[in-house]
Structures are given as structure tokens and as C-alpha cells.
Amino acid sequence: MNARRAEFIAGQVTRDVLRKLPDNLREEAEACVIEFDLVSECIADDPELDPDLLGLFEGCSRLDGTPETPQDLPRIRLFLDNLWAEAEGDVNVFREELRITLLHELGHYLGLDEEQVAALGLA
């Protein structure tokens, strides 16, 4: 799948996920930037980045308080190349992997750790 098509689908899935959140969570999520990246391109800038990542939450969670620097601003990165590979070329599986990964990373933004996110079925 080409990057433009993957970004289009990711945008659709993201809007759908955010629209379906309860109002209070949707309002919280608006403060978190959601980016679509290719891990294959990001590794050049950050060699410590795990090449198998599907998504990544960075910055302050909502429990951490107000970010003090631009680096602390909350953001979620969805790695479309890895998500596509995980889906093995199936567009419907790609959509589902995007949905689950976005919800997983939103859980981290909301202050949940890996164990708590997994308990919600988002691991």
C-alpha cells in the first residue's frame, strides 16, 4: 500500500475512533496530537526507536499536569508501515490494527500503564 492511501485510511479510522469515545474522553483526547509516521523513516532520526513498534505515546499524560516544554506535549505516533506489515496486506485487518493501536496509545495518554491497557483488551 502506498503511503498516501495508508494515511487516508488512518485518518478515517482516527476520526471514527475519536467520534465514538465518550464525550469526556473525546475532549481529553483533543489535547493529544496524533501523527502518522513510517518507522522506517523515523529510525534515521532516532536510532533507539524499536523497529517493530506499531504505535508510541510520547510526552506528558493527562495525569502529569501541564507540559513545561514543547517536548512534553502529548502525542501519539502511529507507524503505518509496521501496521500494514502486521495486517499482512489486508485492508480490513489494517483498519482494526490501527483502531486497537490508537486506543492502546490513548490509554497511555489517559495515564494507564501497559498492564492496565492490556486488562482493557488493548494489548
Image (cartoon, helix red, strand yellow):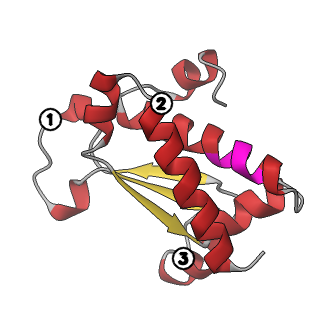
Q: Which mark is residue 65?
A: 1
Quarter of the rendering occupied by the C terminus: top right
Q: Compare residues 88 and 47 and report the one nearer the observer.
A: 88
Q: State which tag comes first along the sequence, 2 or 1.
A: 2
| Image mark count | 3
Label 1: how many residues lie within 10 Å, few (<14), some (14-19) or many (20+)? few
Q: Compare residues 85 and 89 and report the one nearer the observer.
A: 89
Look at mark 2 in the image and give the residue it sits on.
20
Label 3: how many residues lie within 10 Å, few (<14), some (14-19) or many (20+)? some
CB-based contact (under 8 Å), mark 1 and mark 3: no
Tag 3, which secondary structure? Answer: helix
Q: In the displayed structure, would residue 5 be above or below residue 25?
A: below
Residue 56's spot in the image, x, y percent? Answer: 51, 52
- Badge 1 amino acid: Gly
Q: In the displayed structure, would residue 12 be above or below residue 23?
A: below
Distance, label 3 to label 2, CA atoms, is 30 Å
Label 2: how many residues lie within 10 Å, few (<14), some (14-19) or many (20+)? few
Residue span colored magenta:
94-98
Quarter of the rendering occupied by the N terminus: bottom right
Q: Residue at x 63, y 28 (%)?
A: 122
Distance, label 1 to label 3, CA atoms, is 28 Å
Q: Which mark is residue 42?
A: 3
Q: Residue at x 26, y 44 (%)?
A: 60
- Badge 2 amino acid: Lys
Magenta segment, principal secondary structure?
helix
Distance, label 2 to label 1, CA atoms, is 25 Å
